[in-house]
Amino acid sequence: MTIMATAGELTGPRSLDNAKAWMRDRLAKRIHPLGLTEPEATLETIEALQGLDGANWASAWIGTGNRFMALAEERSRAADRAGAREAYYQAYGFYFLGRFPCPNHEAKEESYRLELKAYEQFGALADPPIVPVSLPFDAPGALTSEIRCYLRIPTGAEQPPVVIMWGGVDAWKEEMTELSNAFVAAGIATIAMDNVGTGQSPIKARRNGEIQFLPVIQWVRENHQLDGRRIALIGRSFGGHWATKLAHMMAGDIRCAVNWGGGIHYMFQPDWVEQSRYPDSYLMELVETRSRMLGATNDAEYVEGFRELSLLDQGLLSEPCAPLLLVNGKEDKQCPIADIHLLLEHGSPKSVRLFPGGHMGFGPHTVPTLLSWVVEQLR
């Protein structure tokens, strides 16, 4: 099948003025990646940007992040717990923008280090707290010997069900906070982790990248604080690919899974790879960010790394799967809607919810839809 839809009106990287206009629009709508930070300070930083290169980009956002970090420390010294928590979160959010979409420059790497530090301080003050967890990991080609994630257990809950969640190429475990808030409020524990090849992931994305998630799922099943019989998986954006794969591989071991905007087969074909280089829904450096996730050093490795991820070619789609919800925006230019149709033509029946708009279908009803479906599956 050939994907006929175009991937957007851009034919190359954005200019600084174009990028600023894109960011102002996203900020007004409070849409990723401009949905976390205080609007006035964010707009000031956008207007002051001198360039989209790593040095100028990171410097601007780090400067604003440092202001909020100083405020957080001042409030902490004054024993203002709520005020410090909010300021730490703002500092984290600006540092996140400083490393966005990925730390492919030394200045962006510094912003990422600052982001992790600020987030840990925010998490310690969160209610319920966001607890860092490190699990051992051993696999050929591993970059580290551990998997890092965050555990949140609703206050007073005894063996609650668990949602294990992860993001895509640019939204990592720290960016799962708002989704975690929704589930914790519903009495469900959450574990946030990085997508394969991103953040502190121990491996680069590859055909068997699901091996990163298996130790976390096993740890949940053996943890007496949690109900290991009731596990849901949510993969956001590119991460929906792995949620779908695990739903097929572990049909009898998990209650359900959500693919929120991830690719299956057509996304990984050369024609779509070419079309999606400069989607109008993405700010900048999408190819660089995907390549970093794959560990690809050139275009040929990028195209081949994508090709290997096709779940159709891996022969999984006709297998039974756990209850699977497919969510996206019906005008997505980063992941073709044809992948949803492909899933509906194979294997077990699936649930689908398409929203107006582009990638992931961001809107007021998106997260409530995910929440209500998962809660029902975990009953």
Image (spheres, rainbow, N blue to C red):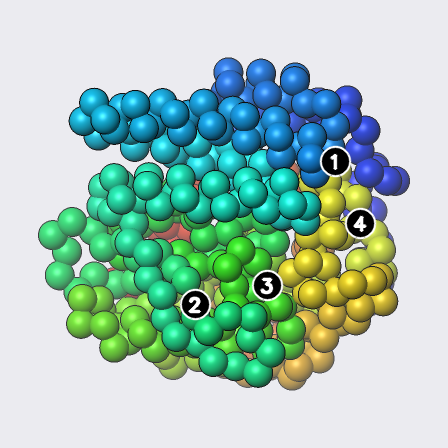
In the rendered structure, the answer to whether residue 218 lies left or right of residue 116 reads left
Residue sitting at x 27%, y 44% = 124
Spatial CA span between label 1 and label 2: 31 Å
Question: Looking at the picture, how far across and down is residue 22, in whole percent?
Answer: 69, 27
The amino acid type, in three-letter code, at marker 1 is Asp
| 115 vs 247, nearest the viewer | 115
In the picture of the structure, the residue carrying the numbered disc 2 is: 147
Q: Are marks 3 and 2 in contact (CB under 8 Å)?
A: no
Q: Nearer the viewer, mark 2 or mark 4?
A: 2
The amino acid type, in three-letter code, at marker 3 is Gly
Mark 2 or mark 4: which comes first in sequence? 2
The image shows residue 285, relative to residue 223, as above or below, that is above
In the picture of the structure, the residue carrying the numbered disc 3 is: 197
Residue sitting at x 41%, y 62% = 148
Q: Do the residues labelled 4 and 1 touch (CB within 8 Å)?
A: no
Spatial CA span between label 3 and label 2: 12 Å
- Characterize the local packing of mark 4: few (<14), some (14-19) or many (20 or more) Cα atoms within 10 angstroms: many
Q: Do the residues labelled 2 and 4 touch (CB within 8 Å)?
A: no
Q: Dividing the picture into quarters, in which one does residue 18 lie? A: top right
Image quadrant holding the C terminus, namely bottom left
Q: Inspect this view and state whether residue 322 appears.
A: no
In the rendered structure, the answer to whether residue 293 lies left or right of residue 303 reads left
The image shows residue 82, relative to residue 230, as above or below, that is above
| 155 vs 110, nearest the viewer | 110
Spatial CA span between label 2 and label 4: 30 Å
The amino acid type, in three-letter code, at marker 2 is Ile
Q: How many labels were placed on the picture? A: 4
Q: Are marks 1 and 3 in contact (CB under 8 Å)?
A: no
In the picture of the structure, the residue carrying the numbered disc 1 is: 53
Mark 4 or mark 1: which comes first in sequence? 1
| 59 vs 199, nearest the viewer | 59
